Amino acid sequence: MSGPVISLGGSIFSKIDEKYLLEFLERIKRVDGYALVVGGGPMARDEISKLRKIGAKEYYLDMMGIQATRLNATLVSLALGNLMEVPRSIDEAVRQMKLYERVIMGGTEPGHTTDAVSLLLAEALSRDTVVNVTNVDYLYDRDPKLKGAKKIEKISYSSAVEMITSEKRGAGANFPLDILSLNIARRSNIRIKIVSFRSPKNVFNAINNRKFDGTTVL
Ligand code: UTP
């Protein structure tokens, strides 16, 4: 069985971007063997920010975030006629994949993001690519809001890690991937294609291994 592993960034769940979510759901129905990891988006951010004000520990904020990713994953799953429970671990996801040849999940445990989950799932399923559907169209050589920021079409794992940790940029700021995801990708040679959800046609070009606009990390 082969098929794409997709990290569907939670930003597509913003009310204002609903049309992109609906179009993504329509198009993904025609793809075989997908493994979809769904992000928490505004729901995760809002609930985490309330809990943070109350003084909850980071561990519990992450637990809240995971619940948000699972609720979004449930929505996607039901929209796609999937009657299985959303798996709570990579192992469970691999079992579902073997049984049903597709899987839709959210987060697993505290300490990372759904991007890292998508890379771990790709490792476990022996897939060589993750398509990261997010709210930026490319990785840029500096904060894209800054004048003169240039698009990057291809970047090595090590250069991406360097960029993410560079102080000039501000650790993690405006970067669509976390360092754990990059490290997992690097150790197992999984390429990451970064594409914006705002161009559904382009997203599916990346998913279907056609030419696409976006950044490849490899
Ligand atoms: P996301 O992975 O969606 O993070 O999980 P994000 O980067 O905020 O959102 P998008 O998808 O890029 O828009 C939301 C939150 O849930 C927790 C983290 O707190 C994360 O920030 N989380 C998620 C975990 O702790 N573990 C997981 O496996 C997944």
Image (spheres, helix red, strand yellow):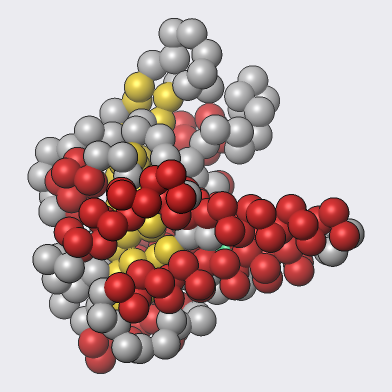
Given the current orientation, which residue lies at the most extreme bottom position? 99
Q: Position of residue 193 (x, y in %)?
A: 30, 45
Q: Position of residue 168 (x, y in %)?
A: 64, 20
- For image coordinates 29% across by 28% down, the residue present is 153
Q: Position of residue 108 (x, y in %)?
A: 55, 73
- For image coordinates 35% across by 82% down, the residue present is 94
**Quadrant occupied by the C terminus:** top left
Work out whether 185 lies above or below 57: above
Question: Which picture quadrant has residue 1?
Answer: bottom left
Work out whether 134 lies above or below 4: above
Question: Which picture quadrant has residue 190?
Answer: bottom left
Q: Quadrant of ligand 1?
A: bottom right
Q: Is residue 130 left or right of residue 50?
A: left
- For image coordinates 61% across by 59% down, the residue present is 44
Work out whether 216 lies above or below 58: above
Q: Total label count?
A: 0
Given the current orientation, which residue lies at the most extreme right position? 55
Q: Is residue 61 left or right of residue 187?
A: right
| Residue 69 visible from this viewpoint | yes
Given the current orientation, which residue lies at the most extreme top position? 148
- For image coordinates 34% across by 25% down, the residue present is 152
Q: Residue 120 or 57: which is nearer the viewer?
A: 57
| Residue 187 visible from this viewpoint | no
Q: Position of residue 29 (x, y in %)?
A: 17, 68
Q: Residue 184 or 146: which is nearer the viewer?
A: 146
